[in-house]
Image: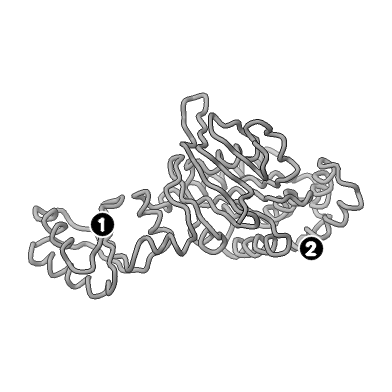
Amino acid sequence: MEAIISIENLKKRYSNGVEAVKNVSFSIEKSEIFGFLGPNGAGKTTTIKVIIGLLRATSGKVFVDEIDITKNPNGVRNLIGYASQETSVDDNLTGWENLYIQGKLYHIPIKEIEERGKELLTMFNLWDRRFDLVSTYSGGMRKRLDISLALIHRPKILFLDEPTLGLDIQTRVSIWEYIRKLRCDFGMTIFLTTHYMEEADELCDRVAIIDMGEIKAIDKPGKLKEIIGGDIITFTLKDGENKNKFLEEIKRIENITNVKLLSNGIYQVIVTQNGDKIIPELFKKSNDLKVEIDSVRLKRPSLDDVYLHFTGKSIRESEESKEDLFRRNLTIRRARR
């Protein structure tokens, strides 16, 4: 497959000394849905802004459809569409007026704006509300309109930064369907960022796990989960003098391939098979050594487990704070209008 985006050794350091992106390299194929999975502050948005020319890289190479962004940051403007985390729609205009103005900014003829506008608003189930003020739209409708604005000039590549942040699961699933339709109907390449595990799993052909400005792994979601192996047992222990001895003993149990300490005092055990039969052995060892197991859980690998495996922490630790911040900022912006 041919790469439409190619990143080589990308670094971005801000003037305050913060290194947001650290020597990142990856490529995205034509018509691929590619996902950046990581928490707030991981470097997702910074990377996208460098790729689309809104930020200048500190070092490295960025090519979009063979255009060198580091040398020609304005060269890709007509090739890309971008929908940021916070919607850029104007509440004081109707949905149609928002779309019309966006089309004029791209110097699209009026007839084509009308044709494309109807096509987009129909696809995103907004046609019947096109003459209503955006201030009367729900959060999901505003997000769908915002994506429509990014599509009016028919870009080859669509960048979606946290496209479903703060939305309920039903609206989230409907936007997933629209994203799939864009790829299916137009062969569009889509690069999205997310901190929702199920979103990355459902949508993306490949996922890059990014944390603290570094890419920890890139592959298909299924392949990433295969890295973990078989069943996963997690447990917590109460403090005791034989705790370390217990951890050493269980490493010798057949079919256990890895024992590691995660965040919040949680231990993770990777089992090649028959995890349900390993749990009784854990309790037997704990009884023999008088170490108390406080809680235990058995499950199949998920992308959350993959993230834990590569970063040593759960992405869910930052989800709530990020959504709360998003909703608070949205409320403040509306109150000021």
Residue occupied by mark 2:
122
Identify the image quadrant of the C terminus: top right
Q: Nearer the viewer, residue 248 or 264?
A: 248
Q: CA distance from mark 2 to mark 1?
A: 50 Å
Between 240 and 39, which is closer to the camera in this rendering?
39
View extreme (top): residue: 15
Vertical order, 48 against 206 (above or below): above
The residue labelled by disc 1 is: 267
Q: Could you tell me residue 294's position as x and y percent?
A: 21, 62
Quadrant of the rendered structure where residue 6 is? top right
Which mark sits nearer the N-terminus, 2 or 1? 2
Q: How is the image coloured?
A: one colour
Q: Which residue is found at the position 90% from the left and 47% from the top?
A: 109
Asked whether 62 or 119 is in front, the reply is 62
Residue 175 shown left or right of residue 198 in the figure: right
Residue for point 29% across, 51% down: 264
Q: Residues within 10 Å of mark 2 (few under 14, many from 20)?
A: few
| Amino acid on which the number 1 mark rests in the picture | Tyr
Farthest-out residue, front: 1
* Residue 223 seen from this side: yes
* Quadrant where the image shows the N terminus: bottom right
Q: Position of residue 57 (x, y in %)?
A: 57, 32
Q: Amino acid at mark 2?
A: Thr
Crowding near the residue tagged with mark 1, few <14, some 14–19, many ≥20 C-alpha atoms within 10 Å:
some
| Rendering coords of residue 53 (x, y %) | 65, 36
